[in-house]
Image (cartoon, rainbow, N blue to C red):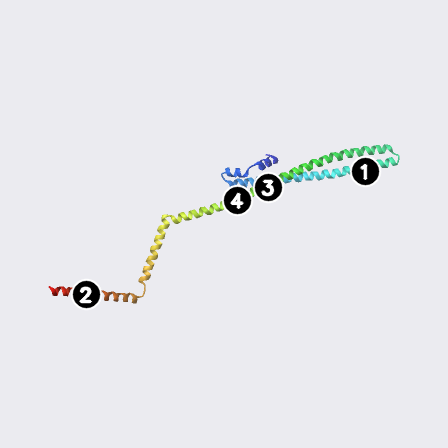
Amino acid sequence: MGIFSRFKDIVSSNINSMLDKAEDPEKMIRLMIQEMEETLVELKAGCAGLMADRKRIDREREEADARVQLWESRARLAMEKGREDLAREALLEKHAAERAAQGLESEQERFNVLIGQAREDMDQLEAKLDSARERQRSLIKRHVRADQRKRVRNDVRKAQSAEAIMRFDRFEQRVERLEAEAELAGPSSSRNLEGAFAQLENSDAIEAELEALRKDAAKK
């Protein structure tokens, strides 16, 4: 495929539509950008060649104009010296130089048009390339956000799994056991004091029950 065919295909293409249909949009846009960059390099090289040719034609046009002036001055000199034959020859050379200058002027105009078209093509392609690069940056951001959401969902699923709940229950049981052990490991004097009061309270209850039994026995 020639450079201008590729350029037309690229400029006329709908990037968004192509990416929406692609199985791998990121890969697709990388290839598109690479194709655009390569085509832009070729367009710039072609434009540089046209500009070099125009400079060559500009120099040839200057030389032709200089020959016109030279042969005109020689024709005047020959007439002043009475050499009409030489003046005629000089005028023939002048006319030939003028025809060459006119042809070179047409070439200059043609190359100016070609260079203008090449610059316009490069501007269009660069605009298309900027759009593609912006879309690429957007795709990269979307990909990063999608990865982040995927990791968050995976973490949530892991936290909600039965295994995670069992691990949490085992951890809670372990904490309760440690709290019980800490309570048992407390000061012995506090436990002894509680036991003494409990014995006193129990002994009063027992004595009251015994007294009730004595009264019942006495009545009988």
Assign the C terminus to one quadrant of the image.
bottom left
Image position, residue 15 (x, y; %): 54, 39
Circle 4 or circle 2, nearest the eye: 2
Give the structural element (helix, strand or loop) at label 2. Answer: helix
Q: Which residue is mark 1?
A: 70
Assign the N terminus to one quadrant of the image.
top right
Against 175, residue 29 (above or below) is above
Q: Which residue is mark 3?
A: 127
- Residue in view at x 32 percent, y 62 percent: 183
Q: Residues within 10 Å of mark 2 (few under 14, many from 20)?
A: few
Q: Residues within 10 Å of mark 4 (few under 14, many from 20)?
A: few
Horizontal relation, residue 72 to residue 182: left or right? right
Q: Which residue is mark 4?
A: 138
Q: Amino acid at mark 3?
A: Ala
Q: Residue furthest left?
A: 220
Image position, residue 71 (x, y; %): 81, 36
Give the structural element (helix, strand or loop) at label 1. Answer: helix
- Residue in view at x 16 percent, y 64 percent: 212
Q: Which residue is mark 2?
A: 208
Q: Earlier in the sequence, mark 4 or mark 3?
A: 3
Q: Earlier in the sequence, mark 4 or mark 1?
A: 1
Circle 3 or circle 1, nearest the eye: 3
Instruction: Residue 20: give its label.
Output: none
Q: Amino acid at mark 2?
A: Ala
Q: CA distance from mark 3 to mark 1?
A: 50 Å
